[in-house]
Amino acid sequence: MKNLSVSRRYAKALMLIGKEDGNADLYSKELDQVVQLFDSNKELEKAVVNPLFDKNERRNVLIKVLEKTDLSKVMKSLLVLLFDKGRIGFLREICDFYKKLADELKGVVHAKLVSAAELSSDAVEKIRQGLAKRTGKDIILDIEQDTDLIGGIVTEIGDLVLDGSVKTQLFNMRESLKRGEIV
């Protein structure tokens, strides 16, 4: 849980800087580049993150690598700050949260669509358009399948859950019958 709050704090701070200087998109791309660099070179990541190595040597490695990149001054400063504060290991979480903030800034919302069966691309597009109309924002759908739903779909947009699954409808009917309500 601490990782999440720390990651949010740094991502929000970077977003504030990005809004101020107009480079919010650039910082998103640069965070991706650094994460990809660590993903493609695990030895480099270990050399920078692993506390078993000498801290000064790890910092020097990071600075030498940053000198060879074309990252912005703000991004280089952020990475050195993360290292100095012992937070460089949270880089992926910071990147993920920053992307969400950048999407919000552009008016884009991620939604999860869970269906019992595979949906056609036309059906997915109609659902996406309906959600976009309802929220007034662009929607990016993450689609999953769950055969336990029996039928229908469940959509999650942030904290809002729109449950149109047969499973839930049957559960609600059963609960109504138990309470003696007429369905």
Image (cartoon, rainbow, N blue to C red):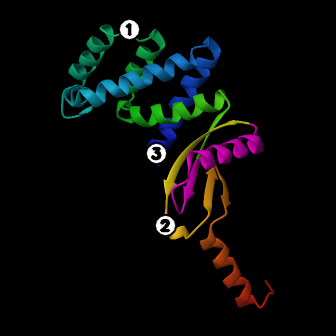
In this rendering, would 155 be left or right of 3?
Answer: right
Q: Residues within 10 Å of mark 2 (few under 14, many from 20)?
A: few
Residue 125 magenta:
yes
The residue type indicated by label 2 comes to Thr
Q: Is disc 3 placed on a helix, strand or loop? A: helix
Earlier in the chain: of badge 2 and badge 3, it is 3
Q: Nearest the camera: 26 or 54? A: 26
Q: Measuring 41% from the left and 12% from the top, which residue is drawn there?
A: 71
Assess whether mark 1 and mark 3 are in contact (beta carbons under 8 angstroms).
no
Q: Measuring 62% from the left and 53% from the top, which residue is drawn there?
A: 156
The residue type indicated by label 1 comes to Asp
Q: Where is residue 137 shown, x and y percent of the image? A: 71, 36
Q: Measuring 36% from the left and 28% from the top, which residue is drawn there?
A: 35
Would you say the magenta stretch is mainly helix, strand or loop?
helix
Q: Measuring 23% from the left and 33% from the top, which residue is drawn there?
A: 50
Q: Quadrant of residue 62?
A: top left
Residue designated by label 3? 2
Earlier in the chain: of badge 3 and badge 1, it is 3
Q: Where is residue 135 shown, x and y percent of the image? A: 74, 42
